[in-house]
């Protein structure tokens, strides 16, 4: 049985091991795969392990032995699910691996906006403290989170963990969407959430209905000085509208771990705006979270081979 890993580098840049996967069959590892290389590398695969490499209908037509696509992520929009189902190809994903890492990164972004850690640290490294007129200073306003309102859009496992951390900071939490429950968290309408929140944090999946929903209208509902955090999907935000709101200081700032296109174009409207922090989709990259992905992916494949497939997204 041929097992092909199409883009293994981001998941495992060398600090983890593929050794257990080698026991599945003939393992073919590629750190990255370009679209023009895909069919040549995968045409005789029984199992494809992919993170973001597009698994297209054309590939499935060429890969006549393909039985399983194991996506090493929760999102599986890189796979043509309709084509897979039509050809009786099982597609599995990895749910709920990054709850703690993503929630932690959400607050790393938020605290950067509220505590100005990087710019103050950089100023000290540049010698500014040594020559300062006063014994302390900050290059930007510092904000205490206690009693601020955290509005969470998408109240699943990650949203609930973010709420728990927010409450530990003394924040008041409101939410929209999701089935998880947490004491002292009030469900409100989406409009009320944007109106009432000092911090809006996105934790919902991307769908056809909510693409670009954070637009000029919704940003216009936010308090002056309110902050927007996105560790979910970049396309939830109309990026041109957000850039305009930031340039006009309509909101206090934004911190984003995701963009609508990754990597972004060099002229992306949000890159370089002083009150906009962008990290390169790193919320999921902790060693612990990546190890969970590898463990669950291995379990998905082993379960499929034994005839009891789990985490199937195209049942």
Image: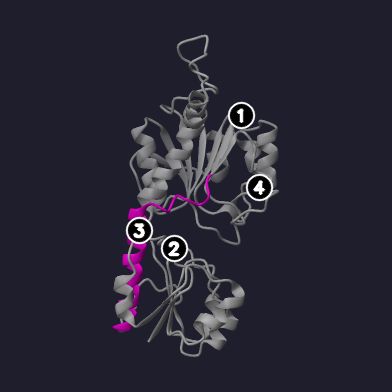
Question: Are there few (<14), some (14-19), or many (20+) residues within 10 Å of tag 4?
Answer: many
Q: Is residue 221 left or right of residue 75?
A: right
CA gap, disc 3 and disc 2: 21 Å
What are the residue bounds of the magenta stretch?
Answer: 279-306
Marks 3 and 2, the one that precedes in the sequence: 3
Quarter of the image with the C terminus in it:
bottom left
Q: Residue at x 49, y 32 (%)?
A: 118
Q: Main secondary structure of the magenta part?
A: helix
> Is there any visible trace of residue 166 in the rendered image?
yes
In the rendered structure, find residue 15 and report the number of the disc placed on it. 3
Image position of 205 with respect to 64: above or below = above
CA gap, disc 4 and disc 1: 18 Å
Q: Residue at x 42, y 49 (%)?
A: 102
Q: Badge 4 is on which residue?
A: 239
CA gap, disc 3 and disc 4: 34 Å
Q: Is residue 194 left or right of residue 250?
A: left
């Amino acid at each position: 049985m041929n097992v092909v890993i199409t883009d293994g580098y981001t998941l495992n840049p060398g600090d983890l091991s593929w050794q257990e996967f080698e026991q599945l069959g003939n393992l073919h590892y590629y750190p990255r795969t370009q679209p023009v290389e895909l069919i040549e590398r995968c045409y005789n695969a029984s199992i494809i392990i992919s993170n973001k490499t597009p698994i297209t209908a054309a590939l499935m037509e060429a890969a006549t032995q393909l039985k399983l696509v194991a996506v090493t992520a929760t999102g599986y929009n890189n796979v043509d699910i309709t084509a897979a189902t039509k050809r009786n190809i099982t597609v599995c994903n990895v749910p709920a691996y990054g709850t703690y890492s993503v929630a932690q990164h959400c607050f790393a972004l938020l605290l950067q906006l509220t505590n100005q850690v990087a710019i103050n640290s950089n100023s000290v490294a540049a010698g500014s403290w040594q020559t300062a007129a006063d014994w302390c200073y900050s290059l930007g306003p510092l904000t205490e989170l206690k009693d601020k309102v955290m509005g969470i859009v998408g109240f699943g496992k990650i949203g609930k963990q973010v709420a728990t951390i927010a409450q530990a900071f003394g924040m008041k939490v409101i939410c929209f969407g999701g089935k998880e429950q947490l004491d002292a968290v009030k469900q409100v309408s989406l409009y009320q959430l944007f109106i009432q929140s000092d911090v809006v944090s996105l934790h919902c999946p991307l769908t056809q209905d909510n693409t670009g929903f954070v637009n000029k209208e919704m940003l216009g509902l936010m308090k002056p000085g309110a902050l927007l955090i996105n560790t979910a999907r970049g396309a939830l935000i109309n990026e041109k509208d957000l850039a305009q709101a930031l340039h006009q200081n309509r909101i206090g700032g934004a911190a984003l771990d995701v963009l609508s296109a990754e990597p972004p174009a060099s002229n992306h409207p949000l890159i370089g705006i002083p009150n906009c922090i962008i990290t390169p989709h790193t919320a999921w990259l902790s060693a612990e979270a990546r190890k969970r992905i590898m463990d669950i992916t291995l379990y998905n494949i082993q379960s499929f081979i034994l005839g009891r497939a789990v985490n199937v997204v195209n049942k």
